[in-house]
Amino acid sequence: MGNTDSVVVQKRLARFRPEERPVVEGVFDRLQSGAEGPSEAPGKTPAGKTLTLEMLQSSMGRLAPDSMVRRIYHCMCTIDPGLSAPAASGKTSASAASGVAREQLVIFLADTLRGTAEERAPLVMAMCQHGAGAAVVVTCEQVAEFLQDLISAVVQILVHRGRLQAWKLERMGDGILGVKLLAEHLCSELKPSDQGCYDVSCLEDWIFRVSQVSLYLEILVAEGLNVSLSGRPAPTLLPPCIGTPWKELRCLLDLPTLMFLAPQNDIYIHNTMSFSPVARPLQRPLETCVFSTRLHGESFTRMAAGLTKCGPTLLLIKDTKGHVFGGFASHAWEVKPQFQGNSRCFLFSVFPRLRVYTATGYNQHFMYFNQNQQTMPNGLGMGGQQYYFGLWLDSDFGRGHSRARPKCTTYGSPQLSGEEDFTLDSMEVWAVGKPPEPEEGEEGKGKKSILDMDPEVQAMMEMAGKTLHSQGLREPEED
């Protein structure tokens, strides 16, 4: 670009490193020439030359739905290089007919790849209004349609670029439904203005709070326009999936849901998947699936044997009404009649709504796991209280409940299952992180207290408000 570039364009280019600026400026020439690889230093383009919709479709057509490509083109056409904001309604149609100028493309790239929520909000507004004319507000339905196109594009990119991390789409849940559920969840975070509408300020607040919008948009633009910037590795949206018996297993998760759940916690799954935070891939030892009713049958004992030998876990349950839900346990499960875990635990639903419910701080009833005792509940539970759990699976297996009137006290979750008392259709347990290692000298510890030998008695005494005087009478441990 020459010295006649607008101040807005020059400021946008200044966000990139010196070695990145030729790449950004070169996108325009490469799109016009139809080249596949990154462009060298940009050449001068004759005055009046612009990018057409067909040029953009040629570059992005394999990686995004055509409706998403048209949204991007419409957005580029609305940019005023002098104002860096969408143009008025009268100018939009004229600009779309004449094409996208070099300055408009540079501003679009800078704002989507290195912009703030304030700068991205007008672009998202324009993409949501695709085919509906320019306006100062958008509807929730328009935002949801935009999100469905955007998420579908990200999924296509993962498939086309070979970044599925060994996940098998044909052995996973309904991806189309997953796209709609994830779009609905992200859209539910959008808050209307005092007038009940969704204007640019609402979109700015939403983009600032919901990081997935900027992340997915950045992935689409960088991959779709082949903009390779130094020091910016491709974000890792999916955890590695190693050692999964895909011929026998059909996973309850779909790809969009996995994209959503993976970064919820700084968690790493070591069985058939290894959750990692966005853009932070981690190499760790991976193991096999801990438990699946499709692989191991409906056996609480078999599930318990797997749970007690691994670290944190992700539980997935589908009931006979079609509801899919579960929970993340931050600690290794321990068979005992007391609650365990910490505030990193959470419950979630996948279908019919995709939601995550984190700890409220009301109590510390995060995890419960008990077996083969007569006077205490036997089964697996998360949240709430005994006999009234946010999520409960009975030790008889096949039956459980999700009780929340109006909400689970521990996680603030509503009823997750189709009916309060549900019948199990299928279940999966995924181990997260490395299995716990026994503490040094654990096997050589001295004889335990009678309270340790019978935790059921201890639990009942605590529930009755009895003081455990013998706790202060233990013999000191030898060094």
Image (cartoon, rainbow, N blue to C red):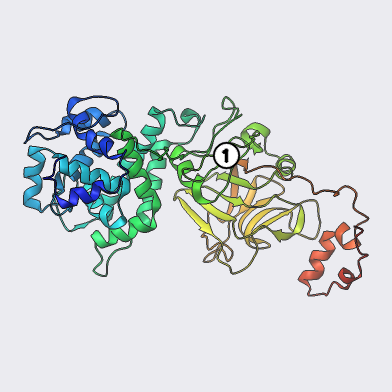
Q: What residue is rendered at 51% in x and 60% in y?
A: 414
Q: Report x, y in % for residue 439.
A: 80, 49
Which residue position is annotated with label 1?
Answer: 274
Res. 43 image quadrant: top left
Residue type indicated by callout 1: Ser
Q: Is 250 drawn above or below residue 394 in the view shown? A: above
Can residue 64 be seen in this snapshot? Answer: no
Query: How many labels were placed on the picture?
Result: 1
Quadrant in the picture for the N terminus = top left
Q: Is residue 232 left or right of residue 166?
A: left
Relative to residue 188, is residue 438 depicted above or below? above
Residue 86 location, x and y as percent? 16, 52
Task: Determine if residue 97 is in view.
Answer: yes
| Residue plotted at (32% across, 61% down) | 205
Look at 27% across and 40% down and name the residue there. Answer: 21
Q: Position of residue 359 (x, y in %)?
A: 56, 62
Q: Quadrant of the C terminus?
A: bottom right
Above-or-below relation of 128 to 454: above
Badge 1, how many Cα within 10 Å: few under 14, some, many 20+? many
Q: Looking at the image, which is closer to me, 284 or 464?
A: 284
Give the SS element for disc 1: loop
Q: Position of residue 476 (x, y in %)?
A: 91, 64
Q: Residue at x 65, y 33 (%)?
A: 288
Q: With 394 as the anchor, is 94 left or right in this view? A: left
Relative to 87, 229 lies left or right: right
Q: Which of 43/327 is in front?
A: 43
Q: Nearer the viewer, residue 280 or 174?
A: 280
Image position of 79 (left or right of 302): left
